[in-house]
Amino acid sequence: MTKQSAIGGWLPVMLAAALLAGAPAAMALNPEAMDLVDRGMRKAKSGDHKSALEDFTKALKLEPNDAEAHYHRGLSREKTGDPKGAIDDFTGALAISPTMEEASYHRGLNKRKLGDLQGAVADFTQALAGNPKRADWHYDRGLAKWASGDAKGAVDDCTAALGLNPRLAAAYYLRGAAKKKLGDAPGAQDDFSKASAISPDFADAQYTRGLGRLNMGDLHGAIEDFTQVLLVRPDFAEAYHDRGAAKKKLDDAKGAQDDFARAVALQPNLAEAYHARGMAKRKQGDHEGAIEGFTQALAINPKLAAAYYERGVSRKKLGEFREAIEDFTQALAINPSLPDAYYQRGLVRWETDDARGAIEDFTSTLKLNPNDPVAYNNRGVLRHQTGDAKGAIEDYSQAIKFTPPRAIPFYNRGQNKLELKEYQGALDDFTQAIAINPDDADFYAARGKARLGLKNKDAAVVDFNRAAAMQPKLMDDLLETLKAYDQSGNSK
């Protein structure tokens, strides 16, 4: 069995020591469950936590009271960025084996990740009651106390940790930060000096691990790493930026914006921070603030295509169509392989009655993303408006092919077939549209017209009556259609 130290690195734990520490022993009575747990542990050790989770889950279905299976599934959930699931499993393990200190410790780690600092301190305390000789556990409890504003408690825990392991650089760093907060500047400087002597590259290693966690989707773990980096290097702009990025992905818009603002204050030429701050502002509905952020990013890095694109999106939202087109065009000049930029520019050109330009942009979108049903549908509408009924039919057919059943592409294609007097094809499309959405009066009116084209007046009248009942304002138009049909010499 292995465990991850809060200070980095994987440390082997001998079975005898694990048992003395209260770690779970293999207790499953079902032989098949025992085999599944063993196999899951091997997979977890090799880094295949997804398959390991499947094995532990199968084992628990066979043997629900296997504390070891709960514990190891919790470790794999912790590794795959599922702190809530991990807490559930460690809780399950402790319900079966209350003296399992490792489970208490790991539950505390995951509670701390989720911001339950009081619960984390309680779990670390429970773990330490069973095994008070773990320096890293004292350190992690100190970190939770520090995060909750208990600087003195953090000092006490770090002092205990250093009494057990005088080479624990992270504990010196944390104690130094806590002493500084308590007004003990000489003591803080002494601790920082000792930490640097032990591990000169601690912050860089922690930051690198945070980036790895961010890229793997372990957002809570990444935030913890960046937070520890900032204890040591409070002027590290990139750490603020990356912590803000993790918070943004967790929908903590305010926390993200605060971190981006700190990054910018420390390093005003950090284009990525301005860009990220613009994204955070837009998520809060502040498009003017977003435009300001993207503009500042571009002042730093004029080749940042993403900033031109995102500024164009915000300008489009504010109705600044000319400026939005300029931004999308500039983004494409830097990176011609941005399908979204072509698509958004196409929407703006459509909005400003530039049908030909919009068709060109949707065509460019489809060259880069040939399975985009919305781009096909939009180009089909524009082709229909510009008199290209056959081209419109082709586009609607592609939209239908690449999207779950939606009524509008069938209806649009049917309208073009109706104009081309392909009445049976139109009838089939309108019937498909009605099957998907039977509550649209326009669909029944259109199908009635297709039925008139097929000389089926009785069925057409049924559809017209249905349409008029749903939308009375259609009545006059439908009566005129029937009158024209009769005057053309058609029989009932």
Image (tube, rainbow, N blue to C red):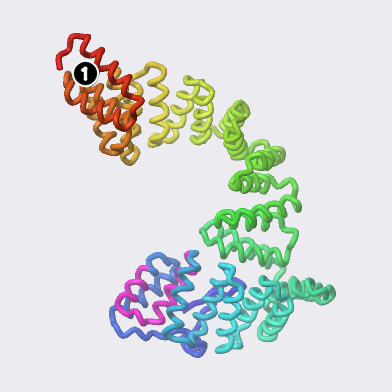
Q: Is residue 182 left or right of residue 344?
A: right
Is any atom of residue 440 visible in this view?
yes
The answer to which of 184 and 407 lies nearer the viewer is: 407
In the image, residue 149 above or below residue 67? above
For residue 30, above or below residue 42: below
Q: Main secondary structure of the magenta part?
A: helix
Question: What residue is drawn where x is 34% and y is 30%?
Answer: 471
Residue 265, image x, y percentages: 75, 51
Q: Nearer the viewer, residue 226 or 399?
A: 399
| Kind of residue indicated by mark 1 | Gly
Residue 301 visible in the picture:
no
- Residue 452, image x, y percentages: 21, 19
Could you tell me which residue is drawn at 56 percent across and 85 percent down? 126
The picture places residue 476, in percent across and down from the top left corner, at: 32, 20
Label 1 sits on a secondary structure element that is helix
Q: Quadrant of residue 238?
A: bottom right
In what quadrant of the picture does the C terminus appear? top left
> In the rendered view, does 32 fall on the left or right side of 243?
left
Residue at 38%, 35% in the rendered image: 373
**Residue 120, image quadrant:** bottom right
Above or below residue 385? Residue 132 is below
Q: Hey, which residue is sitting farthest left in the picture?
A: 491
Span colored in magenta: 54-80
Residue displayed at 67% across by 58% down: 239
- Magenta stretch encompasses residue 65: yes
Q: Nearer the viewer, residue 474 or 453?
A: 474
Q: Which residue is mark 1?
A: 453
**Relative to 64, is 274 on the left or the right?**
right
